[in-house]
Image (cartoon, rainbow, N blue to C red):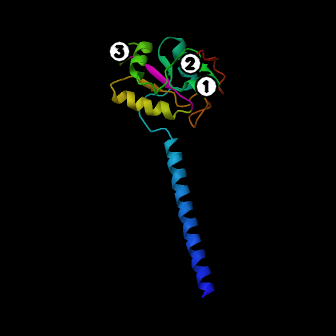
Amino acid sequence: MAAQENTGKRGVSRRLALLGGIAAAAGAGIWWQRRQPPDHDHPRLTVAEAFAHAQAGEITLVDIRTPQEWRASGVPVGSHQIDMRRDDFIAALQTAAGPDPALPVALICARGVRSARLTLALAQAGFSNVIDVPEGMLGSGAGPGWIAANLPVARWEG
């Protein structure tokens, strides 16, 4: 009888461990999925192309990261820093790029996830010339990133 009780307790423990493992795997899957850039068919630029086009005045390059990120790594030379979490993001974007939603705006973040998401959101909001810089500042599957490409970085003065 005592052997049956121990076996029963072990069975419950094993089931709980299995459920915990399943929950952990599901959580990891959700975490991984949220860190993947959504697919889109909007234009993309490498970091070198984004820098060249911004320097030529052909695009408005917008760093959409947070002030903490700007402080930690600096900002791309030639970019406008507009935290994508701002309530007045669209107004700030139009101040930087101009009021015409057809003007070319390139978005850069840390690793291309937020820039891809915001590219889609701005397109849905009526912006017709939004360009993603999927490498980001720190690199991604799209490439090494702004910093590793040795493109100029300025200290954020915020």
Q: Position of residue 153 (x, y in %)?
A: 63, 18
Front-most of residues 21 and 96: 21
Front-most of residues 84 and 10: 10
Amino acid type, callout 2: Phe
Magenta residues? 103-110
Whether the residues at callouts 2 and 1 have beta carbons within 8 Å, the answer is yes
Amino acid type, callout 3: Asp
Residue 100's disc number: 3
Q: Tell me if 145 is positioned left or right of 97 in this view.
A: right
Disc 3 packing (10 Å; few <14; some 14–19; many ≥20): few
Q: Position of residue 35 (x, y in %)?
A: 52, 41
Q: Tell me if 84 is positioned left or right of 76 in this view.
A: left
Task: State the residue at coordinates (59%, 20%).
Answer: 75
Of the 4 image quadrants, the one containing the N terminus is bottom right
Answer with mark 3 or mark 1, whichever residue precedes in sequence.
Answer: 3
Residue receiving disc 1: 146
Of the 4 image quadrants, the one containing the C terminus is top right
Answer with mark 3 or mark 2, whichever residue precedes in sequence.
Answer: 2
Amino acid type, callout 1: Trp
Q: CA distance from mark 3 to mark 2?
A: 22 Å
Disc 1 packing (10 Å; few <14; some 14–19; many ≥20): many
